């Protein structure tokens, strides 16, 4: 069926629906997301966590030059799976939007407002000719006013949903199945990091290496963003 669609040209533009109501270029973009290294997010009892797999394979690469967890504002962090150059553009737009919101309203933008703005941009790139969809899923987490923790994921279509814990990218289904079994609302950030790392250790097997990972968390008690990477995460595996 897919071959037939291609022959008829339904995959040549992101704006062209196939007879069965599919946007094939958007579906191809989703496949690009699933090829990218995974990212995992979790809401904990005392804050939010984002962990990203950088999948470093080049021994000559400087690890901290490959950034996958970004500070959007001092209360919001983001990561992505898929084409990271696409993600960088969206994250930079999110950073500008967050600062403009502070200047305009003299208050920080809440996490969902930032996610909605980025999702609207992604949706536009599935609707107009001469462009292609963003080949990236975004995961944004934050601690809003009154210490309310939020975690949102936006797919390539521009849809977004809130989660307690979830994953995007490579092996996302395996990771989500394990999260469903191990996640509890009572998990603290420390225990949440241990859960995520042990899940990734199980999923990646022999390929598991702490140097692959970059993590950030924000606590609800007004503490600033904390970032950890590589061997700094070793204490959570003990």
Image: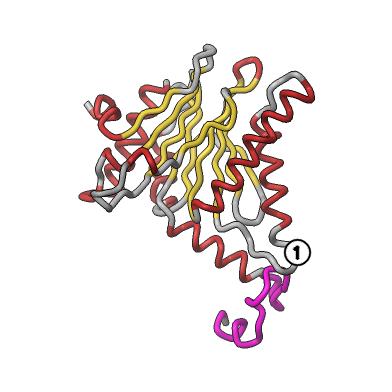
Judge whether residue 212 is colored magenta. Answer: no
Residue sitting at 39 percent across and 53 percent down? 171
Q: Is residue 124 above or below residue 228?
A: below
What are the residue bounds of the magenta stretch?
Answer: 2-22
Is 14 colored magenta in this rendering? yes
102 with respect to 77 (left or right): right
View extreme (right): residue: 104
Quarter of the picture containing the C terminus is top left
* Number of marks drawn: 1
Label the magenta part by its dominant secondary structure.
Answer: loop
Residue at 45% across, 21% down: 186
Residue that label 1 marks = 128
- The x and y percentages for residue 196 are 37, 35
Quarter of the image for the N terminus: give it. bottom right
- Residue 206, image x and y in percent? 20, 50
With 42 as the anchor, is 150 left or right in this view? right
Neighbour class for label 1 at 10 Å: few (<14), some, many (≥20)? some
Secondary structure state at the residue bearing disc 1 = loop
Tell me which residue sits at (53%, 37%) in the image.
78
Image coords of residue 192 (percent x, y): 39, 28
User: Is 50 placed above or below 235 here?
Assistant: below
Residue 220 position within the rendered picture, expressed as x and y whole percent measured from the top left: 53, 16
Which residue is most to the top? Answer: 221
Q: Is residue 49 above or below residue 202?
A: above
């Amino acid at each position: 069926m897919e071959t037939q669609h291609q022959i008829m040209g339904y995959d040549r533009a992101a704006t062209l629906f196939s007879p069965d109501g599919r946007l094939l270029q958007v579906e191809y973009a989703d496949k690009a997301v699933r090829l990218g290294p995974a990212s995992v997010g979790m809401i904990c009892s005392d804050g939010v966590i984002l962990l990203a797999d950088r999948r470093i394979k080049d021994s000559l690469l400087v690890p901290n030059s490959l950034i996958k967890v970004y500070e959007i504002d001092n209360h919001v962090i983001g990561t992505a799976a898929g084409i990271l150059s696409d993600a960088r553009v969206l994250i930079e737009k999110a950073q500008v939007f967050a600062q403009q919101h502070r200047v305009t309203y003299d208050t920080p933008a809440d996490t969902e407002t930032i996610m909605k703005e980025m999702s609207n941009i992604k949706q536009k790139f599935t609707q107009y000719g001469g462009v292609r969809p963003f080949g990236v899923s975004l995961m944004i987490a934050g601690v809003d006013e009154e210490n309310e923790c939020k975690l949102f994921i936006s797919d390539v279509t521009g849809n977004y949903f809130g989660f307690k814990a979830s994953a995007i990218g490579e092996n996302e289904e395996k990771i989500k199945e394990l999260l469903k079994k191990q996640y509890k609302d009572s998990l603290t950030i420390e225990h949440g990091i241990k859960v995520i790392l042990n899940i990734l250790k199980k999923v990646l097997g022999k390929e598991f290496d702490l140097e692959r990972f970059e993590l950030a968390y924000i606590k609800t008690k007004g503490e600033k963003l904390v970032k950890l990477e590589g061997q700094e995460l070793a204490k959570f595996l003990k």
